[in-house]
Image (spheres, rainbow, N blue to C red):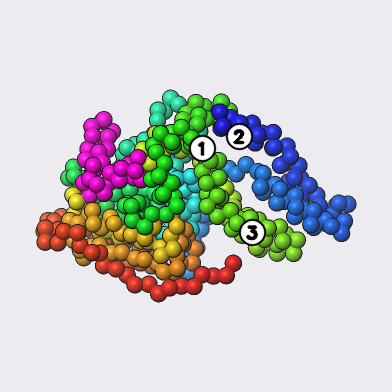
Amino acid sequence: MLYQVYETQRMLMEPFVDFAQAAAKLYGNPLSMAGQNPLAQRVAAGYSLIYRLGKDYEKPAFDIRSVDVEGTSIAIHERIELDKPFCELRRFKRFTDDPATLTNLKGQPAVLIVAPLSGHYATLLRDTVKTMLKDHKVYITDWKNARTVPLSEGTFSLDDYVNYVQEFIRHLQGIYGNCHVISVCQPTVPVLAAISLMASRGETTPLTMTMMGGPIDARKSPTAVNNLAMNKSYEWFENNVIYRVPSNFPGAGRRVYPGFLQHTGFVAMNPDRHATSHYDYFKDLIKGDDASAEAHTKFYDEYNAVLDMDAAYYLDTIKTVFQEFKLVNGTWEVRSVDGQPEKVRPEDITTTAHFTVEGELDDISGSGQTEAAHGLCYNIPKALQKHLEVKGAGHYGIFAGRRWRDIVYPAVKSFILENNKAPAQKERASAATKTIANPRPARVSVATVKPAKR
């Protein structure tokens, strides 16, 4: 019922939002009569803010047209490689007419970036993708808004997520022989499960798995996000945040955790910061500071665009990751594509190099939560394990922005190159048997970087 009320309110407000947009353009045009009013700029700024606060935010585009590789501009063509009911495997194909550059591109590693399914679209990793494209063949999981998926496609669970990841890994392995996997935030858990299951079956596992800011063990340094999931009962979540999609969407009737509720939670975490940011936007418009206003617009176009999550997946994640801690307790069983339960055993991974990344000031996944994966994967040789803590970085800073580009990416790039050629399986297995249980990964020391002024 709440979802229907929200949609009705949004549709009733739509004419006023459109009016605010038109009024902002009218008063912002110096050639119009209204634009010649002494207060025109202030009025235009006010209407523009009203429009930004009230508009409906659609899924943004990646909009990566080209990247610079050693002084050569490389054209990027975005295409869908696999189209699943709840996810698209998206590839960023690189093109150039420079023979030397083309030869270099062909020899670069293939990387699967598993984007989070936790409210925002995969475009939140735009900076991650654009940076990676300079030195890698890049694929990304582009999760669909559950309200656009018809009920005839069935539900989507955490088990389905794990099976999707395995299918995508096999797809890249079929093309390139093998690949590297990077998971950011929420998918660190299902990615570790997917690779564990592949190892248990004797399948070829990825050359490397890089896990960034994820809740492998949410019991360590719990954050406000963790506490909410741990302190409320499963039934509370099912009864208070799950609603059916209204009839005006293709997925009408599907039980989901609505995007607008998730967005409310995001804003509630830092309401003062968002209020100040919007007020600064208003002042920037009055001052004519177009660059600052544009930066605000780009950020909130991404931040305010949210998607619905299928209820089965969301509730599975709450129970498995944040309440019963099945991964770290060794009690997680995943239903395979053919319906058979399979035990998740990270200790079966022996030939995949493992890199974890955490931000010192991460308020989403606390300190030690991601690094805990090394203790589970104790049969990976110590020489193939590494951990990086980025001083002064918050959650988003480890995959976007200056710290990502200057600190994290060089370390990730180096790690992938070091492990791009698969040694003989017997050699790695032999090294694994000599590994001491629960080894401490090699840690990278990074000097604290002062945050840039906003």
How far apart marks 1 and 2 lie (CA) works out to 10 Å
- Residue 323 lies in the magenta-colored region: yes
Numbered disc 3: secondary structure: helix
Q: Where is residue 1 in the image (x, y as percent from the top left)?
A: 56, 28
Say which residue appears at 27% left-offset and 52% top-offset: 206
In the rendered view, tell whether residue 291 sits above or below residue 252.
below
Q: Indicate which label's residue lies in the foreground, 1 or 3.
A: 3
Position of the C terminus, as image quadrant, is bottom right
What amino acid type is highlighted by mark number 3? Thr
Say which residue appears at 58% left-offset and 30% top-offset: 4
Q: Position of residue 201 (x, y in %)?
A: 18, 42
Residue at which label 3 appears: 276
Judge from the rendering whether residue 377 lies leftward or rightward of residue 22; answer left or right.
left
Say which residue appears at 51% left-offset and 37% top-offset: 258
Residue at which label 2 appears: 6
Q: Which comes before the other along the chain, label 3 or label 2?
A: 2
Of the pair 168 and 219, the residue shown nearer to us: 219
Q: Quick one: label 1, few (<14), some, or many (20+) residues within 10 Å?
A: many
What amino acid type is highlighted by mark number 2? Tyr
Q: Quick one: label 3, few (<14), some, or many (20+) residues within 10 Å?
A: few
The span shown in magenta is 319-346
Q: Do the residues labelled 1 and 2 touch (CB within 8 Å)?
A: yes
What amino acid type is highlighted by mark number 1? Pro
Q: Is residue 387 visible?
A: yes
Residue at which label 1 appears: 258
Judge from the rendering whether residue 119 lies leftward or rightward of residue 423; answer left or right.
right
Q: In which quarter of the image is residue 103?
A: bottom left
Q: Quick one: label 2, few (<14), some, or many (20+) residues within 10 Å?
A: some
Q: Which comes before the other along the chain, label 1 or label 2?
A: 2
Q: Quadrant of residue 247?
A: top right
Q: In which quarter of the image is residue 211?
A: bottom left
